[in-house]
Amino acid sequence: MAENNATVENNTTVEETKEEVAPVEKKGGKKHIIVDPITRIEGHLRIEAVIDENNTIVDAFSSSTMFRGMETIMKGRDPRDCGLMAMRICGVCTGTHYQRSIEAVEDAFNVTIPKNARIVRNLIQGALYMHDHLVHFYHLHALDFVDVIDATKADPKKTAEEAVKWAGVSGHKPYISAEADFKAVQDRLVKFANEGRLGIFGNGYWGNKNYHLTPEQNLIGVAHYLKALDIQRDLAKMQAIFGGKNPHPQSIVVGGVTCVQDIKNPARIALFKQLLKDGREFIKGAYLPDVYMAGTMYAKEATDSDATYTATKGKGVGGTGGGILNYMSYGDFKLDDTGFYNAEDLFPSGIVMGGDVSKVLEVDSQKITEDVAHAWYEGTGKPEHPYVGTTIPKYTGLDKRDDGYAYLKTEEKYSWIKAPLYNGEKMEVGPLARMVVGYAKGDKRITKYVANFLKRSGLPITVLFSTVGRTAGRAIETELMSDVMMDWVDELAKNVANGDDSTWTEFDFDEVSVDCKGAGMAEAPRGALGHWMVIKDGKVTNYQAIVPSTWNAGPRDEKGQLGAYEAALIGTKVADPEQPLEIIRTIHSFDPCIACAVHVMDTKGKELAVYKVDPTCAF
């Protein structure tokens, strides 16, 4: 286990554990780095990278080490029940998987939901976006930019002045601006460090020369990190108000939602709105300023075109971590009631290829396939559309060598994640993809928010095509979402006040066609999410889900095309191979959710456990 020694003010040494890192010398002076597991993500991910004599990554491989078996559980089920199981695909975006599965049934049976149900679903999902993006930046990603130990050297007075400065850049008041508040955080941090009790801050490469923030900026980051722990709790409450609970909300059903009493209660709507206002204040006064600060201090990497791998064969668009530059959005958040696939979307659907924002392609769901040439599954020999897709495990193992390490068999199969393709091409999905597609399409709302960010930061649009840009895209989206949700809350309250309390469209399951198929294709916080189901005699005969991290974390396909994670690492310069800060920074910028892309079950069909619930038992 790699270790790092960090010295604070009184020269006390603190030892911290990291990701398992195994650098191994290879022929020609190249090193093969194994980082396993990647921490601060959902699920289990392994990255192998090859670096040259200049410590530049020249090849990379992304591998999930968990098996996905959720689709097989759905077979033989009533399609109306699948949503409750589909939400167990993940412990983060539970409600999104739930809703996509429900929408697949609604698509199959041609069910249109009422206006109140549309707004409530938007509010539940919008609250998830705010919560997820905030938690990701501060608690999963910020420590890739913020050197916690360096914050102990900061001047609290100068820190307060710095906070005001960056809040001014973002056009808002600083969430924390008092010198005493920053001094209190610093005192706690120094005490914990000197006693060897860094706790949540114990896992980091403190002192790495590729940390670029000043001590004062680092202290701002730590202070906001701690405050975000409180804010995210309230954002989670928002999801529960209309969802019934969080995680795993249960108010969404085929035909609408069940929270009739909640939307008829003005106090419930008022509570949601107050929590939204509080969260919005932190987003504008802390989250956005911190992203402006990080974007400015890491601008060199974001504009280093020499460190860019692109699907356009290296034209030098973007910066470190840019990757394949093919962006796709399915579109999401319906703004009217003209039907699921006809309504105007807050986030437009579309595809931008090679970072060329002058042209947008429309999404054709028939062109979506999954390839298993390098994934641990059996296949038909060609990429499969989800309606006919299969999930048959075929694990071929690792390459165990005399040096004591087990390597991926990169010329063969090396991941439990499939390789999704659109018209034979790899895609990146996520907040950045949504912002790029919306900007390229000329969407007025998205263009305004993206343009404001670029103007205030003084950076070109190509800065978005980088690790830093991917992080910025998520922050831009969060501000947009926090603003538009205020309108949605008022729209819901007004509609109910006018006498409309309808939340469900009645339909007769027995009278509709029971031999059909449907898809729920929209967005999740991490990107394009699709659930496909085939129904025969009223039961599910095939079920496939392609989630955002399947698109981004997938391995090479049969043509050798790199996945988004893999391509984003090519060209990245690593300051210290035993401290792969740059690798985890770029991977974290995607906000990986490997538990969504894969899921654990026994590959031999062995029964793992049986549970009996006594419904008469009082808890």
Image (cartoon, helix red, strand yellow):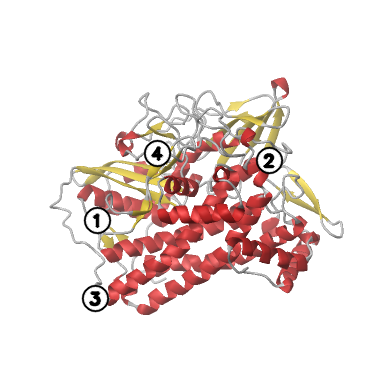
> Which of the marked residues, 1 or 4, is nearer the chain's N terminus?
1
Q: Residues within 10 Å of mark 4 (few under 14, many from 20)?
A: few
Question: What residue is shown at x 59% (from left), y 31% (from top)?
Answer: 60
**Three-letter amino acid code of the residue under disc 1:** Thr
Question: What residue is shown at x 63% (from left), y 64% (from top)?
Answer: 168
**Three-letter amino acid code of the residue under disc 3:** Gly
> Which of the marked residues, 4 or 2, is nearer the chain's N terminus?
2
> Which of the two discs, 1 and 3, sits closer to the camera?
1
Return the mark for residue 151.
none
Is residue 197 visible in this depiction of the protein? no
Which residue is identified by label 3? 499
Which residue is identified by label 1? 338
Give the vertical position of 418 relative to 229 (above or below).
above
Image quadrant containing the C terminus: bottom left
The residues tagged by marks 4 and 2 sit, at their Cα atoms, a distance apart of 38 Å
> Which of the marked residues, 1 or 3, is nearer the chain's N terminus?
1
Q: How many marks?
A: 4
> Which of the marked residues, 2 or 3, is nearer the chain's N terminus?
3
The residues tagged by marks 1 and 2 sit, at their Cα atoms, a distance apart of 49 Å
Q: Residues within 10 Å of mark 2 (few under 14, many from 20)?
A: many
The residues tagged by marks 4 and 3 sit, at their Cα atoms, a distance apart of 53 Å
Q: Are marks 4 and 2 in contact (CB under 8 Å)?
A: no
Return the mark for residue 580.
2
Q: Are marks 1 and 2 in contact (CB under 8 Å)?
A: no
Return the mark for residue 605.
4
Is residue 408 visible in this depiction of the protein? yes
Q: Residues within 10 Å of mark 3 (few under 14, many from 20)?
A: few
Query: Which quadrant holds residue 461?
Result: top right
SS label for mark 1 = loop
Residue occupying the far left of the picture: 511
Residue occupying the far right of the picture: 10
